[in-house]
Image (cartoon, rainbow, N blue to C red):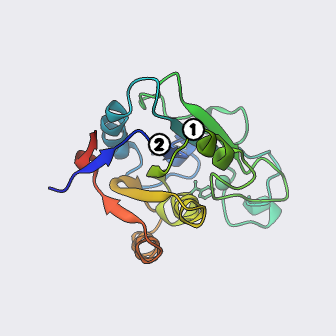
């Protein structure tokens, strides 16, 4: 088993692990809730005050452009302030977690946690170089977030057993693209604090 070190300059991002994307939600991603114990395991390696943990959330107004009734591809989901927009309660989100909201403008979608947010600014301020990526959905918000991170010069480690796709074929394609751009694939049990 390979080991991937959580060094001082590491951060963890948990992408859109909200109730609406889990089983029983408005736009469920198959296998979403089964990621929770894995992500909680990785969170243990990020304990303490120093290492940033980020949770992004899809945070749409009621009339968001991505909703079917507005001509978009998706059923209404993750509407600001609703139960479905909450992070999954079983995630052991530490109190230091930085919450990043995206997709908050009615006429603009944002799949990447860097899109229209202060995430890059916050991470650079903390000297982060290595970003561990988890969450949903692999071919949408995980892909877009990891791609932006690579473009911004971060070392990106995608934890394969901590992500889930809407479509397995598209999820696989997204992973191949990320590998091609320089992302590293690893699993949650390979992550160790160094
Ligand atoms: C997402 C579809 C619509 C995601 C967000 O978080 O991957 N997917 N909005
Ligand atoms: Zn959305």
Q: Quadrant of residue 140?
A: bottom right
Q: Name the residue under label 2.
A: 11
Q: In which quarter of the image is residue 66?
A: bottom right
Which mark, by number, is residue 104?
Answer: none
How far apart marks 1 and 2 lie (CA) works out to 9 Å
Q: How many labels does the image show?
A: 2
- Residue at 46% across / 23% down in the picture? 49
Crowd class of label 2 (few under 14; some 14 to 19; many from 20; radius 10 Å): many
Question: x, y percentage for residue 135?
Answer: 46, 49
Q: Mark 1 points at which residue?
A: 126
Please tell me which residue lies in front, 176 or 46: 46
- Residue at 62% across / 35% down in the picture? 99
- Residue at 55% across / 46% down in the picture? 16
Residue that lies at the very extreme toward the left in this rendered image: 1
Is 2 above or below relative to 37? below
Is 169 above or below relative to 90? below
Please tell me which residue lies in front, 13 or 67: 13
Question: x, y percentage for residue 184?
Answer: 36, 64
Q: Is residue 80 left or right of residue 3?
A: right
Ligand 1 in which quarter: bottom right
Question: x, y percentage for residue 31?
Answer: 37, 52
Q: In this view, does 48 lie to the left or right of 116?
A: left
Check contact, mark 1 vs mark 2: CB within 8 A: yes
Q: Is mark 2 on a helix, strand or loop?
A: strand
């Amino acid at each position: 088993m390979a080991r991937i070190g959580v060094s001082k300059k590491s951060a963890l991002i948990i992408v859109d692990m909200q109730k609406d994307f889990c089983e029983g939600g408005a736009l469920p991603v198959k296998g979403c809730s089964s990621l929770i114990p894995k992500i909680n395991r990785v969170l243990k390696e990020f304990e303490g005050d120093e290492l940033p943990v980020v949770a992004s959330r899809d945070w749409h107004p009621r009339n968001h452009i991505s909703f079917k009734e507005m001509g978009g591809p998706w059923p209404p989901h993750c509407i600001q302030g609703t139960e479905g927009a909450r992070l999954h309660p079983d995630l052991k989100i530490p109190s230091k977690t930085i919450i990043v909201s995206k997709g908050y403008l009615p006429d603009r979608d944002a799949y990447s946690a860097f899109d229209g947010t202060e995430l890059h600014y916050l991470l650079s301020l903390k000297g982060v170089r290595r970003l561990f990526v988890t969450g949903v959905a692999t071919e949408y918000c995980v892909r877009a977030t990891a791609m932006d991170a690579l473009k911004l010069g971060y070392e990106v480690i995608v934890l394969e057993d901590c992500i889930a796709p809407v479509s397995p074929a598209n999820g696989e394609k997204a992973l191949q693209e990320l590998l091609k751009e320089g992302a590293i694939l690893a699993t949650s049990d390979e992550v160790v604090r160094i």
